[in-house]
């Protein structure tokens, strides 16, 4: 479906004025800051961007990203497929002050020149969208030390549910044996 790579850079003002719609694909290896937090090079990142001007004459970009990548399971440290779906509405601004004055539904795209690095833009969105911790379902996780990381799971093998107050009692100093 996506045969072409996403354009690396674009003049966003010109694109907004002519209402450009661009789409393209990226791979994890294209993104030098994103790739190191993944478990592998495999993956597909599909990007669509719609450039326009809004009622306030802002230059606006509607960004949508659908990414299938390999995250690292924080329990067993093996790869796990993860899907990221991102929808953002960005407005081009030229300073932090301008960024602060944007309405809440617009995120700032701070530029110092008309040319915008689209790959970095997508990379920033992907990094923000990544969950801080990914875990396999316990059934598919290869970790043999699940109980070590997940004390709740350990509790499940206890036949009688411990009374939480008893647990507190055991935690009191002097009650250990
Ligand atoms: Zn795992």
Image (cartoon, rainbow, N blue to C red):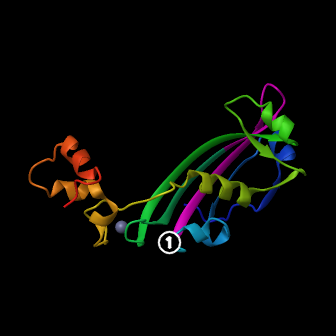
Q: Position of residue 80 (x, y in %)?
A: 41, 66
Asked whether residue 80 is drawn in magenta, I would say no
Q: Quadrant of ligand 1?
A: bottom left
Determine which residue is flagged by label 1.
39
Query: Considering depth in this image, is 166 or 172 the residue closer to the camera?
Result: 172
Q: Is residue 129 above or below residue 44?
A: above
Q: Quadrant of residue 25?
A: bottom right
Q: Is residue 29 above or below residue 2?
A: below
Q: Is residue 77 above or below residue 109?
A: below
In percent of the image, x 52 and y 67: which residue is there?
Answer: 43
In percent of the image, x 79 and y 25: which residue is there?
Answer: 55
Left or right: 162, with 44 as reference point: left
Query: Considering depth in this image, is 30 or 24 the residue closer to the camera?
Result: 30
Left or right: 147, with 156 as reference point: right
Q: Is residue 66 above or below residue 3?
A: above
Q: Position of residue 45 (x, y in %)?
A: 57, 60
Q: Position of residue 117 (x, y in %)?
A: 79, 58
| Region in magenta | 43-62
């Amino acid at each position: 479906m996506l045969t072409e790579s996403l354009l690396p850079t674009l003049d966003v003002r010109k694109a907004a004025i002519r209402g450009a719609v661009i789409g393209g694909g990226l791979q994890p290896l294209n993104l030098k800051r994103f790739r190191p937090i993944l478990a592998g090079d495999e993956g597909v990142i599909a990007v669509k961007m719609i450039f326009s001007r809004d009622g306030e004459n802002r230059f606006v970009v509607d960004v949508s990203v659908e990414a299938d990548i390999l995250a690292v399971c924080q329990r067993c440290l093996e790869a796990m497929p993860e899907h990221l779906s991102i929808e953002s509405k960005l407005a081009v601004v030229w300073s932090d002050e301008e960024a602060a004055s944007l309405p809440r539904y617009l995120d700032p795209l701070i530029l110092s020149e008309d040319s915008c690095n689209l790959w970095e833009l997508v990379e920033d969105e992907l990094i923000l969208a990544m969950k801080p911790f990914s875990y396999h379902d316990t059934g598919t996780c290869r970790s043999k030390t699940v109980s070590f990381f997940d004390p709740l799971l350990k509790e499940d093998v206890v036949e009688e549910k411990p009374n939480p107050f008893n647990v507190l009692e055991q935690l009191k100093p002097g009650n250990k044996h």
